[in-house]
Image: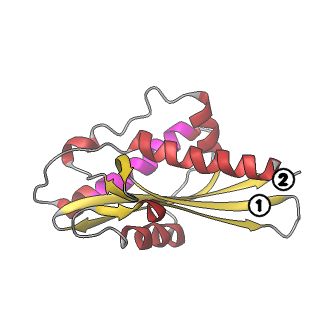
Amino acid sequence: MKMFKRFAAALLAGVMVLAMLTACGGGSGSGASTIGEEFENKYIAAINTLRGENAEKLENDTDLRNKALAQLQKIKDDGTIAAIDANTSIVTPNADGKSVTAVVISVGTKGEPDKGVCQAKEITAESLGEITTEGAGEDAVETMRALKKIGIATKVINGKTYAAIAIEIVQAVS
């Protein structure tokens, strides 16, 4: 039960971080692919800022980025995604028997699910300016420091850019 609570906390922290750092916006314009690249870079920079100067700097991990991209493939042409596909987690016990590795993959969504469907958040040029570390509490900072790897991916669907994040956290178990 204690392991489940820790995993649940890691999962919720990942979802909160995605919600905190992504912003929804309206409209789409030209240059959508550069918006995606800029989003990925700015998001990683924000996480590294939260981790602090003395923490190891994270880069966009290729394997986790590919997992996030696979999650983005589940977004339909109208920008919706099944609620069960918006957040996925994989927990693997480690060989030491004292810890587990949790990978949490989350697509940025807005609003509450309706009949099991969520609306994916669109990334726009305006929303890039809303990626900030201001107001991040100590819980968010501790969660960022606990990250072992991170992968962020963006995908353009019907001219709109969407984002997903995959994080890896190693949690001790009793």
Q: Quadrant of the rendered structure where residue 137 is?
A: top right
* Sequence-earlier tag: 1 or 2: 1
Q: Is residue 173 left or right of residue 85?
A: right
The percent coordinates of residue 123 (x first, y second) are: 26, 52
**Label 1, on which residue?**
100
Toward the left, the furthest residue is: 30
Cα separation, mark 1 vs mark 2, equals 7 Å
Q: Residue at x 19, y 60 (%)?
A: 32
**Label 2, on which residue?**
173
The amino acid type of the residue labelled 1 equals Val
Q: Residue at x 37, y 67 (%)?
A: 72
Q: Residues within 10 Å of mark 1 (few under 14, many from 20)?
A: some
Q: Quadrant of the rendered structure where residue 155 is?
A: bottom left
User: Circles 1 and 2: CB distance less than 8 Å?
Assistant: yes
Task: Indicate yes or no whether the magenta region holds residue 40.
Answer: yes
Q: Residue at x 30, y 59 (%)?
A: 162
The segment highlighted magenta reads 36-50
